[in-house]
Amino acid sequence: MLYLKERPSLRLMTLCMLYFAQGLPFGFVTITLAAHLSEQGIGKADLATLLAVTTLPWSFKWCWGPLIDGIQIRSLGRRRPWILFAQVMMAVSMCAILLIPDLMGNLQMVIWVVFLHNIFGSMQDVSVDALAVDLLPANERGRANGLMYGSSYLGTMLGGAGLGIVASRWGLQTAVWVQLQCFAIIFLLPLFLRERRGDRFFIPTRSNPEDDKDRESFPQLLSAIYAAFQHRVTWVCVLLALTVKVGTGVSLTIGLTAFVRVDVWTLEQYSIVMGGWAVGFGLTGAVLGGVFADWFSPTRVAVAAAGALALVWIGFGLIEAQWMEPIHFAGFGPYHGLNFDRKTVFLCLQEFFAALLSVALFALFMSVAVPRVAATQFTAYMAFLNLSMTIGVSLAGEISGTIRNGDLFVIIGLWQLVPIAIILVVHRTMLDAKKNDTKKGALG
């Protein structure tokens, strides 16, 4: 029997595949399905609603933490039953799309299906994070987090570029079937593997009272969370999480409606760029973000990435009249006379700096989390990040009809000054806290 607790390579592969399973439907919905509906003529408001319900359940995933910690079947594994349940419900909810014959004629039903799917996706995410916290030793967590986050990007790439090509050539239902087959294969890992020696396959047994000694009661957990949110830096980070992804949500919505048109890009072209090249740049940014955060500090990297992202948005907004024109690269040798699509360059740069910013923020939020409730507190920050993106998507649906696309990009670029200022406040607060700790240590 294979036990994740005892096999480092096996548990790393399992965690990465489970994160891949989260990225796959996200790429399918936000790139393939959204582009398919955009090509069919979906309105900006309906598209914004679809994208909003994709991220909205993730904004409240912190609610799953106490539930998953408090309700367990220890004989089947601490996290395994929740992961299996979430995986099954993700597959069932995705199957529901196959039962809708006319997606454009039943948009409200499609939106509800996507909403339900992401509810179970967020449940799986919290369960997998809890499994990682349980099983990964401290010296493996850095490398594992990088590989897990990268696996999510690979899932998004396959869900966007890969399934986008499938949907374009063989139909959207075929793309859904391919996705379900991937779910089925990944489901086998938590089904047949065990967390620890002694865990049972399917039929639970009475738990050993000794196993419950390390489990906190709900009142104890809530008390610890309340104490953690008494710190000033905690609330400043909440404000940061609520503001920093607004521009990304606006850009995602505007990009779809502006680029996926008969006279610009087809579904397949957009899927290849956004789900392929752009995600590849995002994966690179994520890896570099972790390295740079260790070298220069998370706050410095976050400020630099947020500033670069602002410049990309402002610069692209100012050249709206030239979006359809290629960039000519003089170069030399075999690279002489190359032409680059401005939209492709923009999407790749945007994804690179957005990923760089995200990883820097992950490191920053981990560093300010109170150790006793670090997992719950960190999950709360991630939920607020998702809520921030949902706010941006919703705003885009409300204002896109009254403001030119180029002006919107300039506005979100200027908006980035707000989270940059908040990051600097967090940095100053952390420095002051360290100085106070040093003084107390000297006095003691």
Image: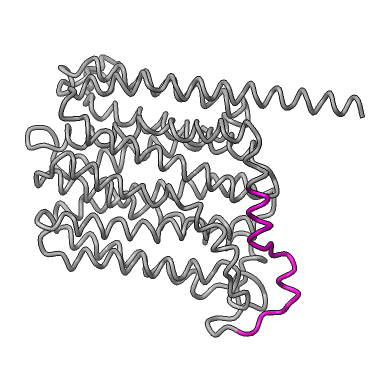
Compared to residue 383, the image places residue 233 above or below, namely above
Residue closest to the eye, 276 or 72: 72
Q: Would residue 366 be found to the left or right of residue 372 on screen? A: left
What colour scheme has been applied to the protein in the rendered image? one colour
Residue ID at (53%, 33%): 360
Q: Nearer the viewer, residue 335 or 359?
A: 359
Is residue 381 one of those drawn in magenta? no
What is the count of numbered marks? 0
- Farthest right residue in view: 444
Residue range highlighted in magenta: 205-225
- Identified at 48% across, 46% down, the residue is 149
Q: Image quadrant of residue 317? A: top left
211 within the magenta span: yes
Which one is nearer the viewer's eye here, 140 or 222?
Answer: 222
Expressed as whole percent of the image width and height from the top left, the position of residue 407 reads: 23, 19
Residue 430: image location, x then y, percent: 67, 27
Q: Residue at x 52, y 42 (%)?
A: 381
Residue 294, relative to residue 182: is it above or below?
A: above
Residue at 19 percent across and 19 percent down: it is 320
Quadrant assignment, res 265: top left
User: Is 102 displayed left or right of 18 in the figure?
Assistant: left
Q: Position of residue 209 (x, y in %)?
A: 73, 77
Estimate the x, y position of residue 123 in percent, counting from the top left.
45, 59
Q: Quadrant of the N terminus?
A: bottom right
Work out which quarter of the rendered image holds the C terminus and state it: top right
